[in-house]
Amino acid sequence: MQKSATASVQEPAQEPWQSTSTSVAEYPTSYPTGHISNFDEEAPRSAFSVVEPPAELSTLTTHLTGHSADDTFPDGGLQAWCVVAGSFCLLMGTFGVMNTTGILQNYFATHQLASYSPSAVGWIPGLFTFFGLSISVQVGPMFDRYGPRGILIAGTICYVTGFILLAESHLYWHFVLTFGVLSGTGAALLSTVALASVPQWFDRKAALAIGISMSGAGLGGVIFPFVLRAGFSNIGYKWTIRLMALLVLILGVLGTVLVKARLPKGRSKSTINLRSLQDARFTWLTFGIFALELEVFAGLGLYPTYVVMQGFSTNTSVVLLAVLNVASTIGRLVAGGVADRFGRINTQTGLISLGALAVFVIWLPFGNSLAGLYVFSVIFGLASGSFLSLAPACIGQISRASEVGGRFGLTYSIVSFATLICIPIGGEMLDKVGKRAMVAYLGSVLIVSLGLFVMARWACLSYRWRWQAKI
């Protein structure tokens, strides 16, 4: 029997989850005629094709796909790439703004809300991100059941209306309701559909496709800070926010036109499927993403404030954030291709390690140096580009195509609590214990996240460690 490069299954007659080896490249590339009906024509199609194992073996990772229409992915074609383009637009308008909340927070804190502490102002972007992720627990199953079109229309209306009302805000509770709640709800509707739609169309190229769509978030994080800086200086606060409303409206309309579901409607039977947490792989990944986004959104939200506190100008803080987001966009594109070749969880753990090194080796000791901040922005940007883009790919590879929306929703509803508390905690640390302690705290959170992703990888191998496994 012909074998692939690194290992083997026991016998072709075994079910995939019964193999004593979970190393991904150990499966035969051909099967006796009597067994071909059980597998796809080109089994194994991908190192990441997944069959849901029985409940009692939920910690096993299998890499063979059953013969199911749901699990037959186009992996390309005009419609599939149109979905990627639509997802790119939606994530540019939602996560791109999330990457820019540090600029908005700094402006609010020095103008309309100058009488409030940084931690109090930090609750406003924190609520925006919280609502942008927490409501996904409802949106994911709605996407599985009803498709994307109605959700995207409603999300665009909520999102744009929130920005229009934000332009008229001048009291604290105005900002909380318009930006935090209303725009956050719209962002949840748009971003959840954007994240859940791409994995329905891609398998072998899933990480690359998601990386391309997530690069929209990085591009938004580059463009929006300069739009805000130029707008605040030249046309004033109100018209700048109205301009932002126009931009996100255009992006929302493009996403609504381009994004389509591949699977038939009505596949989701429950709003919250907590049984997914019985899968140890999914649980470890969920809490790993929780810790990862606790660090990412705190860093993005507080980085401009940190730069200003170090004695540099507001313009310098905008440029440094833009440099970080440019590097992040490049990192998303590169990480997707690397992850499809070497393994998504493998790539994610490596880049988390690089990000932690950047924090402790560059940001912590050289944060008072402009050259050090530029170097950190580039290196951390390259590493952090994968933090958000590979997380959906990691979840998608251990989930059926028909349950991806629900699992994304459950994951990001849990993760949303990290985004709610991350900026207020970091802002309080800036006030009470200083800048260096905050940086050390963010680096420590990355170390915790690294440990959780390592546990997820171990669970994918049925707790048998294999260094060369493509996971």
Image: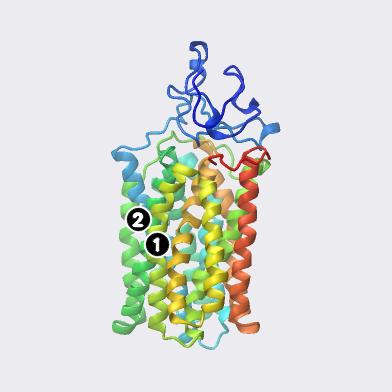
Residue 89, labelled with which disc? 2
Picture layout, residue 146 above or below residue 38: below
Callout 1–callout 2 Cβ contact below 8 Å = no
Residue 459 coordinates in the image, percent (x, y):
65, 42
Gap between marks 1 and 2 measured at Cα: 11 Å
Residue 274 visible somewhere in the drawing: no
Residue 6 shows which numbered tag? none
Residue lying at 45% horizontally and 27% vertically, measured from the top left: 69
Q: Earlier in the sequence, mark 1 or mark 2?
A: 2
Q: Quadrant of residue 202?
A: top left
- Residue type (three-letter) at the residue carrying disc 2: Cys
Q: Is residue 105 left or right of residue 269?
A: left
Mark 2 falls on what kind of element? helix
Tag count: 2
Q: Is residue 9 visible?
A: yes
Give the residue at x 40% y 66%. 325
Residue 234 relative to residue 91: left or right: left
> Looking at the picture, does residue 267 appear above or below residue 288?
above
Residue 140 appears at what percent x and percent y? 51, 47
Which color scheme does this rendered protein use?
Answer: rainbow
Query: Does dot 1 land on a helix, a strand or a loop?
Result: helix
Residue 108 versus residue 146: which sits nearer the camera? 108
Residue drawn at x 52%, y 19% as measured from the top left: 38
Categorize mark 1 by other alpha carbons within 10 Å: few (<14), some (14-19), many (20+). Answer: many
Q: Which residue is mark 1?
A: 218
- The kind of residue on which mark 1 rests is Gly
Q: Residue 29 appears at what percent x and percent y?
A: 47, 23
Residue 468 location, quadrant: top right
Is 2 rendered above or below residue 227? above
